[in-house]
Image: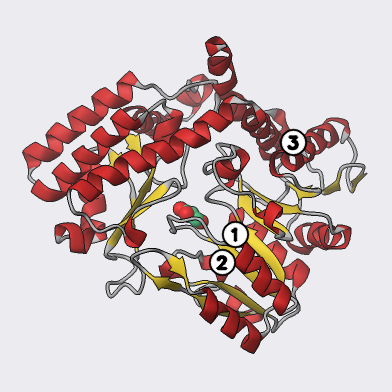
């Protein structure tokens, strides 16, 4: 992207922006929660809507001049509902954490209990980690995997704990878990104890929208929270979806605004609407399925080399690999080595990790961004081989060789500007 005004008026920021453009163009992005947005999404984010205050909701705002903001927000809501089979959508949360916080405040009283996934077993900070302020207000109880080698959740223990602690919310969802969940069991347990079933779909929203993963609403979940910038390939932001219950939807709207947020970021909401339109295009289903195929191709290479993957592999867009057991180096060392080869991923704790979060045992990586660039199974396998090479040999020549190979792959697959226009060319 060009920045002609910034270049003239703010050379220091221009240098950083130009550097980041080059880093993204020439390197490979494997952080599974990142992606590349279209030019259309960027245009919406850079539009004059950033100048506008729009507290309230369409038709019920606290400021004048809302003719166009109302149109934008209503389009975003309608498209979100269609994508996920929801009856209500709140598209104002500024991010995924904000969406989860609003959901808790909408549905709980202080002291109420939430049953959520343990962070080191794949959950998320906002699912009840003690470092969050949420735990000063609500009571979080955590469930875990029964078997780290298969990834099966310990549903029997979850049911036993649910009966004991009587949660108001049974929360599914994850940020580092490579398998599909048994939604029927989650909903059964929630119903048994009179709780709401909530799924944080942030990581797999694009897989659900692209019909490459099951939709929790079809299994009886009451609410879904999400980000819009991961597999869904939209701008940074959050969203809360409700199935049929209008009362719940009203509580969520009140919690988002005025409960927790002020003026919505209308330029981001316009960008969300644009991304939702892209995700409604038939080509998005091909994209979502290719993400899974590419992850499988990487999984095969790591299996071939005897690497230890948590849960034994992956059914979704991400792999969690035990770098310590596989290569004898920490997740932090692996991240740094691969960074030098222009392969970006993140160090990550693994289940019941004995190492510290700032230098844990694992690395987490995935294929959403690579797939957006047009990588197929062949290129994904090639990337996995380069990673194994770097992590095994670790010398300067190997790292430099991988960096050159990565650059070739990246330049042969430029980040696309339009997904819809590109797909229409194929028809
Ligand atoms: N930071 C996000 C991720 O990488 O999964 C979750 O908040």
Q: Quadrant of the C terminus?
A: top right
* First in residue order: circle 1 vs circle 2: 1
Between residue 127 and residue 185, name the one nearer to us: 185
Neighbour tally class for label 1: few under 14, some 14-19, many 20 plus, Cα within 10 Å: many
Between residue 220 and residue 278, name the one nearer to us: 220
Residue under pointer 2: 126
Relative to 33, 268 lies left or right = right
Neighbour tally class for label 3: few under 14, some 14-19, many 20 plus, Cα within 10 Å: many
The answer to whether residue 10 is above or below residue 296 is above
Residue at 32%, 58% in the rendered image: 312
State how far apart marks 1 and 2 are (Cα): 6 Å
Residue at 43%, 30% in the rendered image: 14
Residue at 72%, 59% in the rendered image: 220
- Look at the numbered discs 1 and 2 and tell me whether their residues touch, using CB distance below 8 Å: yes
Asked if the residue at label 1 sits under 8 Å from ligand 1, the reply is: yes
Between residue 303 and residue 414, name the one nearer to us: 303
Disc 2 is placed on an element classified as: helix
Neighbour tally class for label 2: few under 14, some 14-19, many 20 plus, Cα within 10 Å: many
Asked if the residue at label 2 sits under 8 Å from ligand 1, the reply is: yes
- For residue 97, which numbered disc appears in the image? 1
The answer to whether residue 289 is above or below residue 391 is above
* First in residue order: circle 1 vs circle 3: 3
* First in residue order: circle 2 vs circle 3: 3
Residue under pointer 3: 79
Residue at 44%, 66% in the rendered image: 152
Relative to 88, 388 lies left or right = left
Disc 3 is placed on an element classified as: helix
- The image shows residue 426 at horizontal and vertical percentages of 53, 12
- The image shows residue 144 at horizontal and vertical percentages of 46, 74
- For residue 42, which numbered disc appears in the image? none
Select label 2 or label 3 by which is in front.
3
């Amino acid at each position: 992207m060009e920045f002609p005004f910034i270049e003239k008026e703010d050379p220091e920021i221009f240098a950083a922006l130009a550097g980041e453009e080059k880093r993204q163009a020439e390197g490979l992005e494997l952080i599974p929660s990142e992606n590349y947005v279209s030019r259309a999404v960027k245009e919406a984010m850079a539009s004059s809507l950033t100048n506008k205050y729009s507290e309230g909701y369409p038709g019920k705002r606290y400021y004048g001049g809302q003719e166009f903001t109302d149109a934008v927000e209503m389009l975003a809501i309608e498209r979100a509902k269609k994508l996920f089979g929801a009856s209500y959508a709140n598209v104002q949360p500024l991010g995924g954490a904000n969406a989860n916080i609003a959901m808790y405040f909408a549905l709980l009283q202080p002291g109420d209990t939430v049953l959520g996934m343990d962070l080191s077993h794949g959950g998320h900070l906002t699912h009840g980690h003690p470092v969050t302020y949420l735990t000063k207000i609500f009571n979080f109880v955590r469930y875990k995997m029964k078997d780290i080698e298969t990834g099966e959740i310990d549903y029997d223990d979850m049911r036993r704990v649910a009966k004991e602690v009587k949660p108001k919310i049974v929360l599914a969802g994850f940020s580092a878990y490579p398998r599909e969940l048994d939604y029927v069991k989650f909903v059964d347990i929630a119903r048994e104890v009179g709780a709401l079933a909530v799924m944080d779909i942030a990581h797999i929203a694009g897989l659900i929208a692209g019909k490459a993963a099951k939709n929790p609403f079809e299994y009886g979940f009451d609410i879904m929270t999400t980000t819009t910038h991961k597999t869904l390939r939209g701008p940074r932001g959050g969203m809360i979806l409700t199935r049929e219950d209008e009362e719940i939807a009203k509580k969520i709207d009140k919690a988002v605004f005025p409960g927790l947020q002020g003026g919505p970021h209308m330029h981001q909401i316009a960008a969300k609407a644009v991304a939702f339109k892209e995700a409604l295009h038939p080509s998005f289903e091909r994209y979502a399925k290719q993400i899974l195929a590419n992850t499988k191709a990487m999984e095969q290479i790591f299996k071939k080399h005897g690497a230890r993957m948590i849960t034994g592999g992956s059914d979704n867009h991400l792999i969690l690999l035990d770098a310590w057991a596989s290569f004898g180096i920490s997740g932090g060392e692996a991240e740094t080595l691969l960074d030098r080869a222009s392969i970006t991923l993140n160090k990550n704790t693994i289940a019941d990790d004995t190492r510290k979060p700032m230098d844990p045992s694992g690395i987490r990586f995935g294929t959403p961004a690579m797939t957006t660039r047009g990588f197929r199974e062949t290129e994904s396998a090639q990337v996995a081989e380069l990673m194994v090479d770097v992590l095994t040999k670790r010398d300067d020549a190997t790292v430099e060789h991988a960096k050159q190979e990565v650059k070739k792959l990246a330049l042969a697959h430029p980040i696309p500007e339009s997904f819809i226009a590109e797909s229409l060319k194929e028809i």
